[in-house]
Image (cartoon, coloured by chain):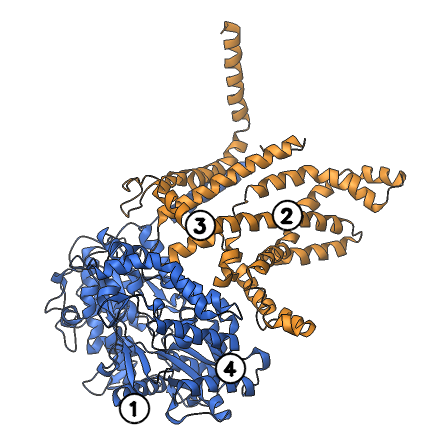
Chain colours: A orange, B blue
Amino acid sequence: MTAQSLAGLRRARRNIWREIYNYRWIYLMILPTLVFIFLFKYMPMYGIQLAFKNYKLAGIAASPWNDFAHFKYMMDEPEFLPALRNTVLISFMRILVGFPFPIFLALLINECYTPRYRRVLQTIYTFPHFLSWVLLAGIMLNLLGSTGMVRKVAMVLNPEAGQNWNFLYDGNIYRWVLVLSDMWKEAGWGTIIYLAAVSGIDQSLYEAAVIDGCNRWQKIVNITLPGIVSMISIQFVLRVGYIMEGGFDQVFNTYTPPVYEKGDIIDTYIYRISFVRTSGVDLGFSTAVGLFKNVINFVMMLSANLFVRSLGQEAVL
Amino acid sequence: MKKFLTLGLALLLVLSIAACQSPTPGGESAAPATDKPATSAPAEGGATAAPEGGSNYDTPLTVSMNVLNAEKNGIDVRHEIVKELFNLSFDYVPIDWSDWNTKISTWVATDDAPDLIWWDLKGQQAQQYADWARQGAFAPLDAKYFNESRPNLTKTYESSKSIDALSVDGVLYSWPAMRANPPEAQSCYTSHWSYRRDWAKAVGLYKEGDIYTWDEWVNLVREVLKQDPGGNKDAGAGLVMPTWGFPHAAALFVGPPAAEGNETSSYIKDDSGKYIWPPATEAFKQGVKVTYDMYQEGLIYKDNMLFNASEAENMIKSGLAFADYNVTGSLNDWTTTMLQDGVIKDRSDFGIAIVTSWDGNWYMTQTEDYWTVTALSHKISEEKIERVLDFWEYLHTTDGIRMRAWGREGVDFEVTGPNPEDVKLNWEFNEATQSYVNPFTNISEFGEANAACGAVMNSVLIGPDAIPYMFEERNRLWSTMASGQVPVVIKEFDYVVSFGSAPNKDKNGSFGSTSKEKLVALLAQPGIDIEAEWDKVVASMMPEVQKVLDELNNGELK
């Protein structure tokens, strides 16, 4: 390395420190966030080693290594692979149906010309997001249960089919109940970010399109959608990163043994084997399953990121 | 502005982190504990075990403990008395029926348990309990604590069957709150069908004495649903059950099979003395078929399988359901609510049904001789242990029973005789309900969680403030048991197999929750050959079950 390049390096370092000093209050403002992330996101990673240990009350360090016993047990457990399959399948169904719907809804809301009407619609659509799944499970029971309104209507239309028709006890229907009720709950909330992206599109493009004779549909296809496609791709990558999250709150509050085969997801499976069955809490096993989940999530997110980048769109990483 | 905002945020973060810190072991809220031992442990048994004229305990202590209904735990006169006598106060940690075991499991596993760990410990969790005890999660309750200074506790220590069951490698790690049932109850569980007597009368199928044969009972439920005396139309229900009792209560608990779930039963012995798995028996399969048929017919409320809290109780209280399987101890509370809401006109409109099984016998299920247990965290100081045990001993004395049930002598009540219940209450009397107005929001606060259930419940049973209905109904059950009016068969509790340890049993228990899940899954499938399907369930589970049975029958159970 020449003396000239060394001097350049020193100068660059000095510049960095000078930059930090110049913006010291800005940096100080992000310090709490960094501390928070370090304390609550990075430090707990120390506990990941539990996935490879038999946890003892004496502590993580004192717990003996177990030769991947939790992972072997995981693969031997007859209910694990169905739960894994269900998690991926339900999550995939959520992406397939639930991911495009907020975009569609945002486009529709955006087409409302009366601002007050638009705000009312937004409020109505967003409201379900703030309801807990405990409450919604009760509503679902009243709507879809044995004495629920939906079954009563079904019995009027087709008494024979309606007799034993129960959305909540039929595994195949149950998955769609999960997906559609989640879509109903979260679609309004999901529109917020897309509406924000739409509002950032240059209005002169629309004016030019009108002059060129574009109708509404053409404006949506040629201006609005391309204008938010980078936001859609970022959201897609982030959503795929949660592919192993099947929605514990929702499933836990609505599932029953008849739908375990089709509706049991990894999180509810862990809960059941940890707290319901007699073997008691096994922190090591829970950690192993959690680690397994997160590794898959991570890989999926990277893959989605690569995929989006290969399409020439803006990616997260 | 930025500076202040930044510093404020940083300070907030530091404060929130500090607030998340666990209290130091043995730390006190009133004043820090010292190593100085208590100056005296005044317990002479009999009527007074507490120090006369105030506390002889120098150091104020605060003990953390988990309790139900924590939101109702205000500071009342009883706390003041305990503070005066024992210099002891409590820091309550809330639990709920639905999360009780979950929280305890989490606390213990993460070494974050309160000083007193109140636990609905049953045989199903016995191995977890033993495992934790061996790892040092609990403070040992050595024999040294039980001597002439604590005669009531010592009596339990020396005579209760549970003491052996709760001992791990010969050391006791938790204290049982003994049941207060009379000897004729034979430690049988008090859950039964509580039903709308007025509806039974309305459909013309009421039986005097509330004793029903199986066919009469099923027919009664059927007729109630058909005639709808409650006017509920489609919203009405026949039989509902709490989550722990669904669906076994319908036929399996009240029928001949030994059924997992009703506080007891895991593996039972057959006539030859060999351990067998109840779900694999013909009697159980018959119970499954009866349950399935009842469910398909709609006698059992179809959405009961979606219940996850107190929906069954709510349906009864709101007059939507005909009968609920539950502990008889709820009768006073429930009937009071139902009376207030106009659901029933008289308490006697809702009572206990004695339902014999399809083989003509009345099956009662025996359980442990305690309700719940209290373990002590390994972090608790010796001083706290001594103080708590003194307090528990006091709760067993006449003074303690009166304090817990009625408050302060001379203010809340006057003593009229030597027995605990010989008191005259100074509480407000409600002429409308003809009962005293209890000033304590949480009357069970010093009950089970402080290991005094038996002693206290006995006196409440006959105290001047007690609503007699529940006790009358319960006594009717036990007198029917004792009279031989109905052939009674007791499903006996086996301490050895419930609390014993063997490798595969420890790992899988009795497979109770798995078999229950599979049964519930079958209920939701109409038109199946339930017996054949149940055979398949048993066959699929037997390879693992057999490993446990082999252990039990080869003498590997410790």
Circle number at residue B319: 4
| A259 relative to B359 in the view: left or right | right
Circle number at residue A80: 3
Q: Which residue is pictured at 43% across the width and 86% down the height?
A: B215
Q: Secondary structure at mark 4?
A: loop
* Rendering quarter of residue B396: bottom left
Q: Position of residue B238 (x, y in %)?
A: 49, 80
**Disc 1 is attached to a residue of which chain?**
B
Give the residue type at disc 1. Gln
Is residue B406 visible to us here?
yes
Same-chain check, marks 2 and 1: no
Spatial CA span between label 2 and label 3: 24 Å
Q: Position of residue B375 (x, y in %)?
A: 25, 61
Same-chain check, marks 1 and 4: yes
Q: Position of residue A226 (x, y in %)?
A: 74, 38
**Residue neighbourhood size for the residue with mark 4, other residues' Cα within 10 Å, grouped as few (<14), some (14–19), many (≥20):** many
Spatial CA span between label 4 and label 2: 45 Å
**Disc 2 is attached to a residue of which chain?**
A
**Disc 4 is attached to a residue of which chain?**
B
Quadrant location of the C terminus of chain A in the rendered image: top right
Spatial CA span between label 1 and label 4: 31 Å
Spatial CA span between label 1 and label 3: 52 Å
Q: Secondary structure at mark 1?
A: loop
For disc 2, the marked residue is: A96
Q: Which residue is pictured at 18% across the width and 72% down the height?
A: B53
Between A300 and A226, the one nearer to me in the picture: A300
> Is B277 situated above or below B365?
above
**Residue neighbourhood size for the residue with mark 1, other residues' Cα within 10 Å, grouped as few (<14), some (14–19), many (≥20):** few
Q: Nearer the viewer, mark 1 or mark 4?
A: 1
Q: Earlier in the sequence, mark 2 or mark 3?
A: 3
